[in-house]
Image: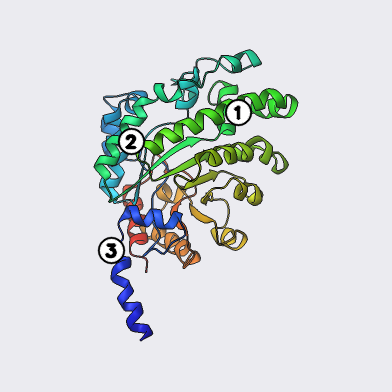
Amino acid sequence: MTVAVANAAKPAAAALTSRRRVLNACALQPVDRPPVWLMRQAGRALPEYRELKQKHSFLELVQTPELAAEVTLQPVRRFGFDAAILFSDILVIPEAMGQSYRFRDTGGIGMDFAVRSPADIEKLSVSQVCEKLGYVDKALRILRGELGDRTALLGFAGSPWTLATFMLEGGSAEKYTRALNLFRKEPKTFNALAEKLATAVTAYLEMQIEAGVDAIQIFDSHGGLLAPAEFQEASGRWMREIISRLGGKVPVIVFSLGTHGNWDDLIATGASVLGIDWRFSLANARRLLPAGVGLQGNLAPALLSDDTPEKVAAETSQLLEAMRERKGYIFNLGHGVPPNAKLENIAALVETVKNFK
């Protein structure tokens, strides 16, 4: 009788769409296999993206809804990921607040000015963020129509702390020190900037939710710059505030790079799922984190560029086994897809996840 019931349940599990698989995982509900998507899955590794890039700048691709939608869909068409994530950039927020960005000829990102004073912060405006980012709204609505109920659609934003590190440096930097100095020496000024950013990010994410995203990821890519004792006040509290303001309308994934010692603070953000970077054992994360929190990760990105499909498949299988029967697990890399990733390695990763029993 037990065997018959178990066998009878299999067709229902096999019938899950990619979208439902992602939503179930975020809600800690049963899935037939872990869903899979990759950070930076759209873009530089794909020949179809490079072909578009010969005709359009990065900013043109981001700011033209039809092009942003096309780039978002390219990896889903090629590899069959369970989720598409909007092709965009975290720096659209400071740009919409009045601090534009561009790509330097020498590499990296430059901003039109660096935030240096309370007066600079005062000039940043949150009132028209959604209006200025209307191109994102349009891209998401195109994508929702294209993906339908088959594939999940993910939106995203940078965390206030990570955005502040770029804004205070005026773009990419070898060392991000200005945000740390401001937080440590002038906390009231730092908080004024972080509060504005939290308000802008919340409005932006609410716009994405209204446009049809199924889940949101917050990238706290520079969280690891903070000492463990500083993380909650400088970064964690602002992500918690954003997630609280969103009111549970969609699941939120928090990916905070290099903050493994701050599990309690990360859980306190209210995230449905925590992304684990490649430098921490996923098996240990499973052991340390409560079953009521989903986990995402965390294959080393370098495997996609430096190794063979066989090695990628073996490492992927090892992670899947480590997370077997853990509810709320989403397969991903521990950071973004490298630009020189081999297509056959990405394909091996996806095939291994899809065939996992």
In the rendering, which numbered label is found on residue 140? 2
SS of the residue at dot 1?
helix
Q: Is residue 204 above or below residue 294?
A: above
C-alpha gap between disc 1 and disc 3: 44 Å
Marks 3 & 2, CB-CB < 8 Å contact = no
Q: How many marks?
A: 3
Identified by mark 2, the residue type is Leu
Badge 1 is on which residue?
195
Q: Quadrant for the C terminus, please.
A: bottom left
Badge 3 is on which residue?
15
What is the x, y in percent for residue 334?
49, 49
C-alpha gap between disc 2 and disc 1: 26 Å
Mark closest to the chain's N terminus, 1 or 3 = 3
Residue drawn at 45 percent across, 31 percent down: 204
Mark closest to the chain's N terminus, 2 or 1 = 2
The image quadrant that residue 176 belongs to is top right
Q: Residues within 10 Å of mark 2 (few under 14, many from 20)?
A: many
Q: Residues within 10 Å of mark 1 (few under 14, many from 20)?
A: some
Q: Quadrant for the N terminus, please.
A: bottom left
SS of the residue at dot 2?
helix
SS of the residue at dot 3?
loop
C-alpha gap between disc 3 and disc 2: 26 Å
Identified by mark 1, the residue type is Glu
Identified by mark 3, the residue type is Ala
Residue drawn at 24 percent across, 41 percent down: 146
Marks 1 & 3, CB-CB < 8 Å contact = no
Q: Which residue is more in the foreground, 226 or 305?
A: 226
Mark closest to the chain's N terminus, 3 or 2 = 3
Residue drawn at 29 percent across, 24 percent down: 56
